[in-house]
Image (cartoon, grey):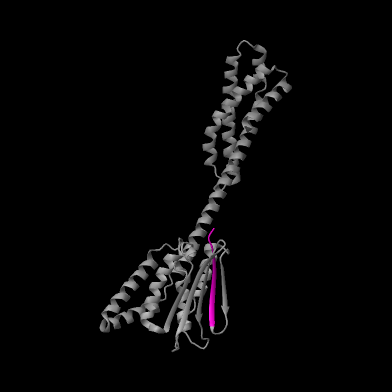
Amino acid sequence: MAWVLLFGIQTLAFIQLFAIDWYHAFIDNLVFGVVFFLLGFGSWYFIRFTSLEKKQFSSLFVEHLAYSFVLVSIWVFSSTYLLSTIFSASTEYIQLIWRIIEWRYMIGFLLYLVMVVVFYLHDNHQKQQQRTERESQLLANLQNAEIDLLRSKLNPHFLFNSLNSLNALIQTDTEKASFMLVQLSDFLRFSIEKDKQDRLSLEDEIKNLDRYIAIERIRFGSRLNYIKDIRESALHLKLPAMLLQPLVENAIKYGIGSRLDDVEIKITANQQSDYLVLELMNDFDKSVIVRKGSGNGLDNVRKRLEMIYNGSAVIKIEDSGSLFKVILQIPQH
């Protein structure tokens, strides 16, 4: 469209400046336009290899000046000879086109300048887009790596304690040992195989959480009271894999700790509008001293939700002194 507009402007200017009829002006600018258009394709390759980033301005200027002179010379004389052949019977017109060679050169240099500017602007725009895409991809990769790291922080103490309990059970209760081994195997397989970025259904998350609770119940026995109140309508809703396990792990650490009393951990889930709403409640004793480095589960969950949902997920904490509650609101859109 821009080329057609430029062709039309040149035709009108040719008629006004040199008092030539529209037919000769039209054919004249058509020939010059088509020849320059064809030569311009070759110019793109030259311009592409004369990068603004890799060469000094003086060197770049000399290269473009030399190339433009060659290009414009080929354009002017090939088009002029072609028009001389087409209008060989029109002596007055042929004399005119040879007389305005300088004017043709001026137009040719101007067109080349426009072509160079357009190319560099287009090239810069493309590079900027590619740079933005690479930065976005890098940021996404870094974010995914951090999500992976947060998700992979399976407490080694849980694994060591489970293996120690398993070793003891092998000597005293092989049936329980077999059951614990299956639960531990399934739990670890789930934690490894589930992709960290994918959402999974609440039903699958709860099933894996049940495995974790089953393992911990073998350690703590009847002292660990686990209650679920999951609405059926919420089972198909999505959340990041293994989001609840570190919260339950914290609840067990701070709830049971060194206490001898029973501890109740309750999970409720329902759908509110376009959100999956989860509540995890547990008995809590502030006097309990836990291992150094414990309690990071809540921070990890908060960071994962922030990175995955970009602020649209909500996490709330309610602490009454004896009851600790974590409320999660996870968007489903």
- From what the image shows, is residue 305 above or below residue 43? below
Taking the view exactly as shown, the residue that stands out farthest to the top is 89
Q: Quadrant of residue 89?
A: top right
- Considering only vertical position in the picture, is 290 above or below 30? below
Residue at 59 percent across and 33 percent down: it is 68
User: Looking at the image, which residue is at 70% across and 24% down?
Assistant: 12
- Quarter of the figure with the C terminus: bottom right
Measured from the top left, where is residue 126 in percent x and y? 55, 46
Q: Is residue 129 above or below residue 194?
A: above
Residue under the point 61% across and 39% down = 118
Q: Give the range drawn in magenta.
A: 323-333
Q: Establish if 277 lies above or below 79.
A: below
Can you give x and y, in whole percent of width and height, for residue 45 in the image? Answer: 51, 37
Residue 239 visible in the shown view: no
Q: So how many labels did they put on this image?
A: 0
Residue 201 position within the rendered picture, expressed as x and y whole percent measured from the top left: 45, 63
In the image, 23 versus 224, the foreground residue is 224
Residue 213 falls left or right of residue 64:
left
Q: Is residue 180 left or right of residue 5?
A: left
| x and y, in percent, of residue 256 in the image | 45, 84
State yes or no: residue 160 in magenta. Answer: no
